[in-house]
């Protein structure tokens, strides 16, 4: 077998490893299995917190480390336990929301509570994507801040994701970090937190470095991960901001883009 050129494969989930129907194709499973058999480690790096990620990892038979919650959580899938967890300063987040709403008007808000079984709270008017992921509606804004959080989600009735994220950075960028993580998903995070910070912690536990890493993603929240890794691969369906910083663009998530790259690295042309 040809030696695999990277010791670490970092993959986002939504829009990257997962197809549109939330499945992982057999071709992609086989390619990842072949790469790990050739000596590479695979780390899932996702914006989803652990409660929204665990069932996918279990279905994959994944028992290694995963980086969840935009880097806030390093999770040991095999042992079903959190190794690290970073929470959002609720006072700063509340101030950030107030400043942003003073600038752009009322927002629809949701939040992800910290922990292995932390609920996702969804406020009035927040548009939840169709699917099986559980959430808890709330009406009283005080409930949002009643327990530790790892992030807050925001939506605006008129502004699109990029415009809302830009407004949030301009008005509250010194209080929280702001990322676009998917369609209709703009998030407020602890200042300085990114997928790169979580991935660096997980990689260090495995004795691996940025130079050992190939990363796959599709959204602007993957930009720090691409900056950290030696080689960043954007999916064909990726946001233009991520494509602009990628070293390579592969096929879409629905066309097994991860497998396309891994297969070429496992069997390079003579």
Image (cartoon, rainbow, N blue to C red):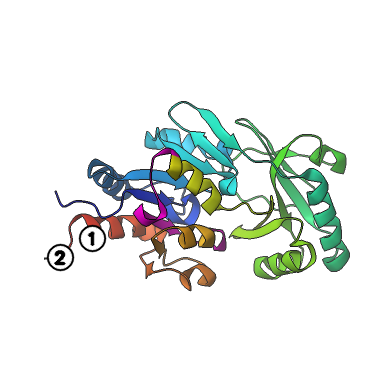
Residue 94 on image: x %, y %: 83, 50
Locate the C terminus and report the quarter of the image it occupies.
Answer: bottom left
Asked if labels 1 and 2 touch by Cβ distance under 8 angstroms, the answer is yes
* Residue in the picture at 58% in, 49% down: 70
Q: Answer whether residue 140 is visible to the viewer in this image.
A: no
* Closest to the observer, 187 or 60: 187
How far, Cα to Cα, is label 2 from label 1?
Answer: 8 Å
* Residue in the picture at 56% in, 37% down: 50
Residue 201 on image: x %, y %: 50, 43
Q: Which residue bears the numbered disc 2?
A: 269
Q: Residues within 10 Å of mark 2 (few under 14, many from 20)?
A: few
Membership of 215 in magenta stretch? yes
* Closest to the observer, 95 or 62: 95
Q: Which element is circle 2 on?
A: loop
Left or right? Give the position of 152 relative to 245: right
Q: Which comes before the other along the chain, label 2 or label 1?
A: 1
Membership of 43 in magenta stretch? no
* Residue in the picture at 39% in, 39% down: 206
Q: Which residues are magenta?
A: 205-221
């Amino acid at each position: 077998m040809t030696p695999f050129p990277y010791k670490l494969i970092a993959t986002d989930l939504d829009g990257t490893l997962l197809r549109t129907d939330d499945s992982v194709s057999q071709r992609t499973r086989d390619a990842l299995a072949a790469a790990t058999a050739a000596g590479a480690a695979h780390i899932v790096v996702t914006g989803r917190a652990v409660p929204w990620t665990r069932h996918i990892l279990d279905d994959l038979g994944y028992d290694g480390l995963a980086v969840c919650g935009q880097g806030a959580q390093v999770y040991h899938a095999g042992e079903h336990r959190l190794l690290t967890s970073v929470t959002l300063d609720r006072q700063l987040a509340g101030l950030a929301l107030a400043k942003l709403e003073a600038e752009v008007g009322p927002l629809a808000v949701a939040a992800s509570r910290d922990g292995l079984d932390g609920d996702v709270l969804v406020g009035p008017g927040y548009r939840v994507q169709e699917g099986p992921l559980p959430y808890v509606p709330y009406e009283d804004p005080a409930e949002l801040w009643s327990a530790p959080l790892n992030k807050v989600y925001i939506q605006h009735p008129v502004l699109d994701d990029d415009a809302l994220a830009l407004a949030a950075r301009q008005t509250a960028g010194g209080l929280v970090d702001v990322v676009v993580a998917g369609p209709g998903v703009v998030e407020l995070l602890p200042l300085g937190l990114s997928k790169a910070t979580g991935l660096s912690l997980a990689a260090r536990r495995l004795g691996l470095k940025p130079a050992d890493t190939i990363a796959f993603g599709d959204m602007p929240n993957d930009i720090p991960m691409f900056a950290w890794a030696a080689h960043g691969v954007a999916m064909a369906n990726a946001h233009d901001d991520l494509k602009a910083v990628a070293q390579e663009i592969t096929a879409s998530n629905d066309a097994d883009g991860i497998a396309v790259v891994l297969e070429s690295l496992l069997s390079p042309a003579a």
